Amino acid sequence: MSKAWVLVANHTHARVFEAEKRAGSLQEVESLVYPEGRMKGHELISDAPGRAFDSNGQGRHGMAKPTDLRKEGARKFARDIAHTLERGRQEGRFDRLYIVAEPSMAGSLRSSMSTPCLATIAGESRKNLTTCDSEEIRAHLPTWL
């Protein structure tokens, strides 16, 4: 019998469920948390970037390029989730994957996943259901899963 995994994720929390039977209940098999995703920008950095003098004149400017630390953290979390999914695929724990994730996380996940893992995706829904219980999540999924 083929097994399906359902990934429910946002930028701070991911839950992996297993669905063995069609229209059956979901069993949570793994949970991943990225607490830094809830932090404010100034809490993520410990110091201001260094300063340097201009090559011509007396001006000064910051040395580091400004980056969006929250987006970079979400991409790192997406890579961690993709690694978990890849490990499950290699161990034969699922052969179909259904992704339920907020839109920005869904895009980061797809870009972080390996080609064989991408091939297992049976469907996708761009919603944030991480706080819902398994019955609510199942109600949002297709019956063929």
Image (cartoon, rainbow, N blue to C red):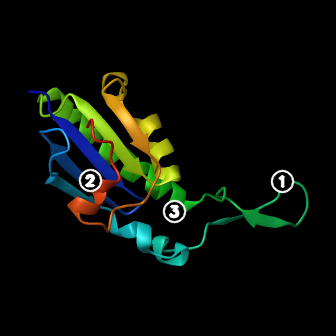
**SS at badge 3:** helix
3 or 2: tag closer to the N-terminus: 3
Q: Give the left or right position of residue 71, taking residue 5 as reference.
A: right
Q: CA distance from mark 1 to mark 2?
A: 61 Å
The number of discs equals 3
Q: Looking at the picture, tell me which residue is in the foreground, 145 or 5.
A: 145
At 41% across and 40% down in the image, what residue appears?
A: 124
Above/below status of 22 relative to 34? above
Please name the residue that numbered disc 2 is placed on: 138
User: Between tags 3 and 2, which lies in front?
Assistant: 2
Q: In the image, 48: left or right of 124?
A: right
**Can residue 8 be seen at all in this image of the molecule?**
yes
Q: Residue at x 15, y 46 (%)?
A: 24
x, y percent for residue 8: 32, 53
Q: Which mark is residue 70?
A: 3
Q: Which amino acid is tagged 1?
A: Ser
Q: Residues within 10 Å of mark 3 (few under 14, many from 20)?
A: some
Q: CA distance from mark 3 to mark 2?
A: 30 Å
Callout 2 secondary element: helix
Local crowd at mark 1 within 10 Å, few (<14), some, or many (≥20)?
A: few
Mark carried by residue 55? 1
- What's under tag 3, amino acid-wise? Arg
State whether residue 37 is above or below residue 18: below
